[in-house]
Image: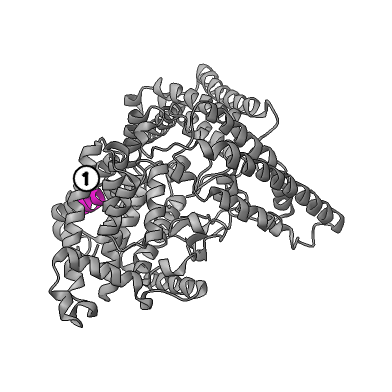
């Protein structure tokens, strides 16, 4: 579902100096508190005060160290900077995170107030995950089908608000750092290559074509914000801004061209032939770590693989029931005579080839998504008592990256920064973008999936800033998959082909559990993974290939979806059982989402406590009940 920031270099010494300055200010604040107590004030420095200070310092550091994210969220503290790229930036951040971790471990959690205990647990988990992930050195392989400067630079202006003259001035200053960032990234990859750290070959397929498309486009997207500057900026200054931007763009193009040549001649030829995480640096430990991080559970590859196979069998049975309700089934008696496996294969072949399931233009596809989203918008008040203020839109994935991108993704915005959320849909190869997948995809990426959940987290009152984006793929993607299922109660799947599309998407996520663990733990080949997906889903061949390559390059991540969705559904079922007539689906959803993303065990404990509290209160909550989802 959010795209990572791309790093840019500051002058040497700046990062350490400002981090140490922030640290010093924090320490001074604590010392002043101690001094005040010594002078007769009635309170002493407590662990809660120390934790508050540490959490505030951590947030200031994040805003300064990751300016792209801070700018988009409206919390900018380094408007003319971007994230430091290359080994120096990585090491600086690692050292600072390790320092934060040591300081939080030194605090006595038991003496903290209950609200701070939860924040302590979440922040310590975030810091520990970041520290642990460093030893696997994945940061030395930042270029692949789904990321790298060839994707980040053309989208550099996205997520940046332009309202006052300083916005354009700072934007141009940031542009001037792009070429150095690309070269520092390449230098880090050279070092990684020397250590044998290169991604599997499928992950790098199409990367050179992405670079070529960007170079042909001349990075004109970078200059677009300066095409029309506000009249308040003097003409001479406007000309100077455009001149500096043009020079920065040309420097960035040169750096991209250099990287493209190096990748083609020196890097990609050394791509790993094995697709399995276990054959990478610290492979078995690495995959175990990623599964734990992305699922927020202790499930083993064997357990996850079995869950996947069980879900595939269950969903396959439901698919057969839906097929029986289609005109494909009723119009041809020979289809009903087929065995179950043959019938499913024949039906999938029909879906992949019948032109009625495909749009003829990108505009028609996007218009179809917008229509579906507006239909969903009207149903949201039935299922949520709190809705985000932030609007969202639908736009196509940039064409230079579309051939090697997945079907869609979401990019968050912020009311503070004046930026909407965006649901990006892939319009490349229209004969691979069937209409029966559009409803579940809209529910997942827009509302009530990613846009609603992320926007509510950003706008939530009374939680610390870091809580709005806690690293919990199982919650974020599990919720989005759960949101697809809410379309049943909304009446969106009345057409059996659309309902099959829902099951197709659920099957897709179940298959992920099988092929991800299969490739990274049990020796499944890329071809075998593709065959498994082709035999159990109606995804297009192009989408299946892209998905399998994604799992190869991002081990464990795809397992978070189904694991998270299953747990959210279990939590809801348990709450319905415990509360009976007191259960209100709107209140349940609001409480589930209002604390931001959470690890699944924390979410379970929080919702159990919510049920217990409601049971102690007299009266009925609401009659909406348990229909839907």
Range of residues picked out in magenta:
565-572
Q: Specify whether residue 124 is painted magenta.
A: no
Residue at 40%, 31% in the rendered image? 280
Q: Position of residue 413 (x, y in %)?
A: 52, 55
Residue at 47%, 30% in the rendered image? 137
Label 1, on which residue? 608
Whether residue 139 appears in this view of the structure is yes
What is the residue that sits farthest to the bottom in this orientation? 331
Q: Position of residue 419 (x, y in %)?
A: 56, 58
**Residue 418 horizontal side relative to residue 10, left or right:** left
Which element is circle 1 on?
helix
Principal SS element in the magenta part?
helix
- Observer-nearest of 197 and 234: 197
Residue at 40%, 41% in the rendered image? 471
- Compared to 367, does 274 lie above or below? above
**Residue 552 horizontal side relative to residue 512, left or right:** right
Q: Position of residue 348 (x, y in %)?
A: 27, 67
- Observer-nearest of 188 and 474: 188
- Observer-nearest of 357 and 290: 357
**Residue 477 horizontal side relative to residue 489, left or right:** right
Locate residue 293: give its quadrant.
top left
């Amino acid at each position: 579902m959010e795209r990572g920031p791309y790093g840019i270099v500051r002058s040497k010494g700046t990062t350490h100096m400002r981090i140490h300055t922030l640290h010093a200010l924090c320490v001074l604040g604590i010392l002043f508190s101690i001094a005040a107590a010594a002078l007769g004030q009635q309170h002493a420095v407590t662990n809660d005060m120390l934790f508050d200070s540490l959490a505030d310092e951590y947030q200031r550091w994040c805003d300064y160290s990751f300016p792209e994210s801070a700018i988009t969220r409206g919390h900018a503290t380094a408007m003319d900077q971007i994230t430091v790229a290359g080994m120096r930036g990585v090491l600086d951040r690692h050292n600072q995170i390790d320092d934060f971790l040591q300081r939080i471990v030194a605090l006595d959690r038991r003496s903290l107030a209950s609200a701070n205990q939860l924040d302590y647990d979440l922040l310590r988990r975030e810091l520990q995950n970041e520290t642990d992930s460093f030893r696997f050195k994945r940061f030395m392989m930042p270029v692949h089908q789904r990321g790298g400067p060839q994707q980040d630079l053309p989208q550099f202006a996205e997520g940046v608000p332009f309202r006052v003259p300083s916005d354009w001035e700072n934007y141009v200053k940031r542009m001037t750092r792009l070429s150095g960032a690309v070269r520092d990234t390449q230098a880090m990859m050279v070092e990684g290559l020397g250590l044998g750290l290169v991604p599997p070959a499928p992950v790098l397929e199409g990367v050179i074509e992405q670079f070529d498309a960007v170079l042909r486009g001349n990075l004109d997207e970078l200059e677009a914000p300066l095409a029309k500057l506000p009249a308040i900026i003097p003409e001479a200054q406007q000309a100077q801004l455009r001149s500096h931007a043009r020079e920065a763009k040309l420097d960035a193009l040169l750096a991209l061209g250099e990287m493209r040549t190096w990748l083609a001649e020196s890097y990609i030829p050394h791509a790993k032939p094995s697709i399995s995480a276990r054959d990478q640096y610290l492979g078995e430990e690495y995959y175990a770590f990623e599964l734990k991080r992305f699922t927020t559970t202790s499930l083993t590859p064997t357990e996850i693989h079995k869950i996947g196979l069980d879900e595939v069998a269950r969903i396959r049975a439901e698919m057969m029931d839906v097929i029986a309700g289609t005109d494909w089934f009723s119009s041809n008696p020979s289809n009903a005579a087929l065995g179950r496996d043959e019938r499913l294969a024949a039906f999938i072949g029909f879906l992949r080839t019948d032109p009625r399931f495909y749009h003829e233009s990108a505009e028609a596809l996007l218009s179809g998504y917008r229509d579906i989203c507006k239909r969903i918008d009207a149903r949201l008040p039935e299922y949520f008592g709190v809705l985000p203020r932030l609007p969202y839109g639908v736009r196509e994935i940039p064409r230079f990256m579309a051939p090697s991108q997945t079907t869609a993704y979401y990019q968050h915005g912020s009311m503070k920064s004046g930026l909407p959320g965006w649901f990006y849909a892939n319009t490349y190869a229209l004969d691979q973008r069937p209409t029966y997948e559009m409803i579940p995809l809209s529910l997942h990426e827009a509302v009530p999936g990613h846009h609603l959940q992320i926007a509510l987290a950003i706008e939530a009152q009374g939680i610390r800033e870091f809580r709005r984006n806690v690293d919990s793929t199982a919650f974020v993607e599990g919720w989005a998959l759960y949101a697809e299922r809410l379309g049943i109660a909304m009446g969106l799947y009345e057409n059996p082909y659309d309902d099959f599309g829902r099951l197709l998407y659920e099957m897709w996520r179940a298959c992920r559990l099988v092929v991800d663990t299969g490739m990274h733990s049990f020796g499944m080949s890329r071809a075998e993974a593709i065959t498994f997906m082709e035999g159990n889903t109606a995804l297009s061949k192009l989408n299946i290939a892209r998905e399998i390559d994604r799992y190869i390059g991002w081990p464990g991540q795809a397992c978070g979806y189904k694991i998270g969705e299953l747990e959210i559904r279990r939590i809801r079922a348990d709450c319905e059982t415990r509360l009976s007539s007191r259960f209100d689906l709107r209140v349940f959803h609001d409480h589930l989402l209002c604390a931001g993303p959470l690890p699944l065990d924390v979410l379970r404990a929080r919702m159990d406590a919510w049920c217990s509290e409601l049971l102690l209160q007299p009266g009925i909550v609401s009659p909406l009940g348990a229909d839907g989802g």
